[in-house]
Image: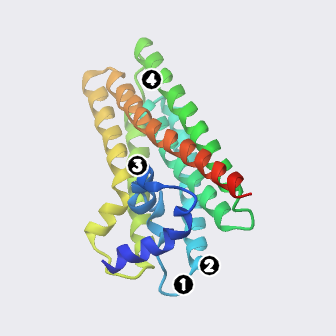
Amino acid sequence: MEHQKTLMSMDAPFRRSYDFRRHSMEKDDAMDGGCGGGACGGGSSRSSRGSGGLRRTLRMAMVVNGLLGALLLAAADATQAVSLWAAALLVLNHAAGHVVTLAGMGLRPEWRPRLSMLQGATLAFAAMALVVTAGRSIAGMILPDVPLASLALLLAIGVTVAAATLLFAGRRGRLTLRAIWLCSRRDVLPLGAGLAGLAASWLLLDGAPDALVGAGVAALLLPAAWGLWRGGFQGAGRREARG
């Protein structure tokens, strides 16, 4: 309970600009989505409290996600696994979310609604492009390099869980397996689905399962993209009304 109150108190300034209650997926991402990915680093630190500690945590998560996303992009290009493209999009979207949050906490908070709209539009475009790529992969009967792609996804899962553990370790409250799971599940579940799709492709000698899983992950990101764009649009409108 104390852990949840800490998260709510740190997120309070941003709720004035964004109504997270209207966007349940965005709220979940902000409150318990990927630590290496998201906002589980939003609580107070034992060694440093306040916005300074939150900024350091967000920067750490941003760097972790940026590097992991670049690695997944390289692996996707090498293996032609659609699930890796989807995983890269998921992770890089987390990094972009940290950039938007840091911009809102900085000297230019008025940039946050516009950056949120840009993030939402970019995410929607990339997700739709990935769905098209999945269709072309199925039509072309492309079989990905399953062993290498699986290793990349296992590495991504390991980094996600490790980041969740490290970021929770610097916060108030007990570090438990349940807390780590709640923090990392929104990343671990899609990555695990990617592994299942790759396994099915290997067993069937057909790239369709991998492509379908990748398309499914991309489609699940579309509501989040809409929530980001709509929240940013409403936030910009409120700022203009006050101005």
* Eye-nearest disc, 2 or 3: 3
Q: Secondary structure under badge 1?
A: loop
Residue for badge 4:
134
Q: Are marks 4 and 1 in contact (CB under 8 Å)?
A: no
Return the residue found at the far top. 139
**Depicted 184 relative to depicted 136: above or below:** below
**Mark 2 or 3 closer to N-term?**
3
The amino acid on which the numbered mark 2 sits, given as a three-letter code, is Gly
**Mark 4 or 1 closer to N-term?**
1
**Depicted 6 relative to depicted 179: above or below:** below
Query: Crowding near pointer 2: few (<14 within 10 Å), some, many (20+)?
Result: few
Q: Are marks 1 and 3 in contact (CB under 8 Å)?
A: no
Q: Are marks 1 and 2 in contact (CB under 8 Å)?
A: yes
Query: Crowding near pointer 1: few (<14 within 10 Å), some, many (20+)?
Result: few
Residue for badge 2:
52
Residue for badge 1:
49
Is 214 or 101 nearer to us in this picture?
101
**Mark 3 or 4 closer to N-term?**
3
Rendered location of residue 54, percent (x, y): 56, 73
Q: Secondary structure under badge 3?
A: helix
Rendered location of residue 107, percent (x, y): 74, 67
Q: Secondary structure under badge 2?
A: helix
Is 136 or 47 nearer to us in this picture?
47
